[in-house]
Image (spheres, rainbow, N blue to C red):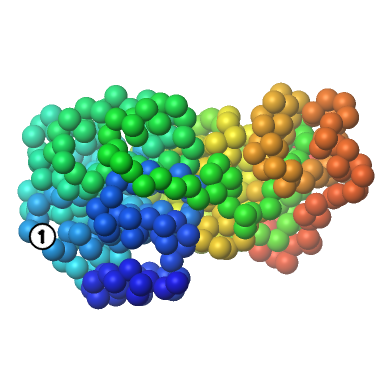
Amino acid sequence: MNFHQFQLHEKIMAGVKVSGYIEPTPIQVKSIPAIMEGRDVMGLAQTGTGKTAAFALPILQRLMGGPLGVVRALIIAPTRELTEQTQNAISQLGYKTGLRSLSIYGGVGILPQIQTLRRGVDIISACPGRLLDHINRKTVNLSKIEVLVLDEADQMFDMGFLPDIRKIIKHLPAVRQTLLFSATMPDDIRGLAGDILTNPVSFQIGYSQPASTVAHTFYPVETQRKNVLLDKILENTETGPVLVFTRTKIRSKRVAQHLDQSGYKTAALHGNLSQSQRQKALDGFRSGRYKILVATDVAARGIDVRKVSHVINYDIPNTAEAYTHRIGRTGRACETGDAFTFVTCEDKILTRSIGKLLEGNVKYCSLDGFPDISAILGGPSGETKTRAKTGIRPNRPKRTAGSYVKEKDGRRRAEGRR
Ligand code: AMP
């Protein structure tokens, strides 16, 4: 299968070409023809599957045929990063079409957004809060919307955005095409889908499963020794860009400081940063200036950095679904990746539920001086038996090939110090 079979306009094909896409991904194969037929779509798709182009390409195709400078497509997403990233993808894919796109989110001045809207925009990629702000100020006109996309709907629900979304939908024409994408399908999202989609084509791509290109390893550790474990892993593992997840903003700041002092070029990404600081951290990570980005879940939502070689869950995610999202940052679009998760005694239930999600495709690795997985899961379990039987010491850390240049000024902290 190649992109020519979709019979996209040649100006859109130019965008596909500059994006470097050769073959459509499975979600693109399934959704592009249905969306081009004008059908509503409910897509259960994990992150990193090529979802953005799956809806962006048919939207560009549809909009090329009509009046320019009128907002006719609206994409709503949970975070600024995802909103910005979607807009970037659309402007790259549509760079020859003459269609104009704008991302709308809070935390930055509203005036430039208003000025751009006045000049005429065809596609808006927005976070719910700031979009409602524009609606209330009457600085955006959504009465001509032909296509609505709700992206990462489960996360929008988690973040409490569903009431805002329902308010926004009241300002859209009742007759429109609606596309809803979600990595998981909690009951509330199913309810919303039932209310706003008409006779949708439904499909799922790797429902709730992280991409198969990722290898999963759990590292048992005592809570207070996570930094020591992190240092050991980084010292002994050959990596490219590394994304480290923490549960709280304060911890992401502290872990980033620790790594920075250990000689790794590191940035933190969390909700206490201003938009320009967040952008700086992300841009620095993308460009390679920072080798490690330490982020919280919300801040990291939608980060698209190609070639993240390792995702390290310094703190285990709160749900199995959140694990899928975090891990979606590596192994994207057929690159391979590793996911390392630190597990402590308090994480017993989550360790088991994520293990279940991964259907046994998880390895347990106890480094010397760190507890065995049985100490975490408590007594003999299916998982520990597997390890005892097979003697797995997975992802045996490779000697580093020097992905990081360590500073030799003695700044690396002694083991055990925090
Ligand atoms: P997404 O799931 O939309 O965030 O996309 C994940 C990554 O895959 C992004 O870096 C896209 O640019 C890339 N991508 C999307 N479609 C394709 C494709 N057909 N071939 C190669 N890469 C793609």
Is residue 316 among the parts visible in the rendering? yes
Residue at which label 1 appears: 66
Where residue 305 appears, as percent x and y from the top left, is 48, 57
User: Residue at position x 21%, y 33% from top?
Assistant: 169
Residue 302 vs residue 383, the one in the foreground: 383
Where residue 127 appears, as percent x and y from the top left, is 29, 38
Q: Residue 369's image quarter? A: top right
* Number of residue marks: 1
Residue 101 horizontal side relative to residue 179, left or right: left
Q: Is residue 220 above or below residue 19?
A: above
Question: In the rendered view of the protein, which quadrant contains the C terminus?
Answer: top right
Residue 74 horizontal side relative to residue 265, left or right: left
User: Residue at position x 49%, y 37% from top?
Assistant: 184
- Amino acid residing under circle 1: Gly
Question: In the rendered view of the protein, which quadrant contains the N terminus?
Answer: bottom left
Where residue 277 appears, as percent x and y from the top left, is 39, 44
Residue 417 vs residue 316, the one in the foreground: 316
User: Residue at position x 23%, y 71% from top?
Assistant: 9
Q: Residue furthest front?
A: 199
User: Residue at position x 10%, y 60% from top?
Assistant: 66
Residue 392 horizontal side relative to residue 41, left or right: right
Where residue 115 appears, as percent x and y from the top left, is 10, 48
Local crowd size for mark 1, using a 10 Å CA cut-off: few (<14), some (14–19), many (≥20): few
